[in-house]
Image (cartoon, rainbow, N blue to C red):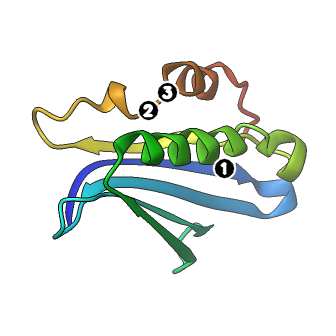
Amino acid sequence: MDNLLTVAFEAHHAGKNHHRRYEVTVGRDLFDDWTVTIRYGRVGRGGQEKRYASPKPDEMRAVIRDRLGRRLSAPKRIGCPYRLAGFSTVPGFDAADWLPGEVMARFFAVACPAR
């Protein structure tokens, strides 16, 4: 599988001992289908992994929008917000076409408590 885009988020709350990581990877598989791999769990641990595949990129964009939207509710659920921890893409890949701007803007608008 060719990884074209990877974006990672982390949420830390020392008082509650929450240290979580969430990573989304977009790629293409051997059949030229679009793939989205989501890895999540405690920072520094193996965690869980879910994979989605479809020949239709819009279906994969919907998965990303849904999953990232859920991360925005983290302050209510786990007591701290997710923050952008990493981003990589291959040259020529339009990341803005895959990452919903209104959702990404909200990640940067969330106030972050002290670690």
Element carrying mark 2: loop
Give the residue type that dot 1 points to.
Ala
Report the side of 55 relative to 37 (left or right).
Answer: left
Q: Are marks 2 and 3 in contact (CB under 8 Å)?
A: yes
Characterize the local packing of mark 1: few (<14), some (14-19) or many (20 or more) Cα atoms within 10 angstroms: many
Residue drawn at point x = 35 percent, y = 47 percent: 56
Element carrying mark 3: loop
Label 1 or label 3, whichever lies nearer to me, is 3
Q: Which residue is mark 1?
A: 11
Q: Are marks 1 and 3 in contact (CB under 8 Å)?
A: no
Give the residue type that dot 2 points to.
Leu
Q: Is residue 87 above or below residue 103?
A: below
Reading the chain from its start, which is encountered first: label 1 or label 2? 1
Image quarter of the C terminus:
top right
- Residue 115 visible somewhere in the drawing: no
Characterize the local packing of mark 2: few (<14), some (14-19) or many (20 or more) Cα atoms within 10 angstroms: some
Q: Which residue is mark 3?
A: 100
Q: CA distance from mark 1 to mark 2?
A: 19 Å
